[in-house]
Structure formats: C-alpha cells, structure tokens
Amino acid sequence: MIFARMIYFALGLLEILIIIEVVLSWIMIGNENKYTIALHRITEPFLEPGRRIQESLFPNLMIDFSPFVAIVIITFLKRLLIW
C-alpha cells in the first residue's frame, strides 16, 4: 500500500515536471540554465519513446506530441494503481 502511494506520488510529480518543461520550452527558447538542464534530464527518458513513435508515423511534424503521449501513459498507470 505504501509502495503504491509512493509510485502514485512519483508519477504525479513526473506529470508536473513534464508540464513545466513544456511551458518552459515555449518561454525560454534557446536559453538553458542548470535547472532547465536538470529538468530535461529527468523528463527526457519518458518523452523520447513518444518522439520516436511520432517521427516514425508522422515524419517532419512541426508539433511535438510526446508530452501528451507521456501524460496519457502516466495517467493510465496512475489509474491502474488506484484500481
């Protein structure tokens, strides 16, 4: 029970970090500091599979849907934990 709550909390935190990275990518175009680099290192392993899928299905698409895919998967995992 405690382990499931810890995983649920970690997944929720990951969702928030992905949303923060998306917003920062709109605001801070080309500007990086140690915090944005750390945020990118945390979220990139969860975003990269979505980018690969998107590139194989829709090459050269200007919009990156990998954050949406990652959040959908995280939400599914959280609901699976609750169930």
Image (spheres, rainbow, N blue to C red):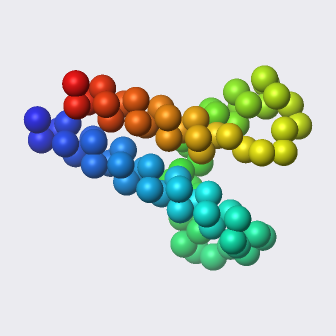
The answer to whether any part of residue 48 appears in the image is: no
Query: Seen in the image, is 64 located left or right of residue 70?
Result: right
Rendered position, 32 above or below 19: below
Q: Quadrant of residue 26?
A: bottom right
Q: Quadrant of residue 32?
A: bottom right
Query: Seen in the image, is 7 located left or right of residue 58?
Result: left
Counting the numbered discs, the total is 0
x and y percent of residue 63 in the render? Answer: 77, 45
x and y percent of residue 22 in the render? Answer: 62, 57
Query: Seen in the image, is 5 located left or right of residue 67?
Result: left
x and y percent of residue 34 in the render? Answer: 58, 74
The residue furthest left is 1
x and y percent of residue 62 in the render? Answer: 84, 45
Rendered position, 40 above or below 72: below
Q: Quadrant of the N terminus?
A: top left
Q: Quadrant of residue 45?
A: top right
Identify the residue shown where x is 70% and y is 27%. Answer: 53
Identify the residue shown where x is 86% and y is 31%. Answer: 59
Identify the residue shown where x is 52% and y is 53%. Answer: 18
Q: Quadrant of the C terminus?
A: top left
Identify the residue shown where x is 53% and y is 56%. Answer: 19
Query: Seen in the image, is 33 located left or right of residue 46?
Result: right
Rendered position, 57 above or below 23: above
The residue furthest right is 60
The answer to whether any part of residue 5 appears in the image is: yes
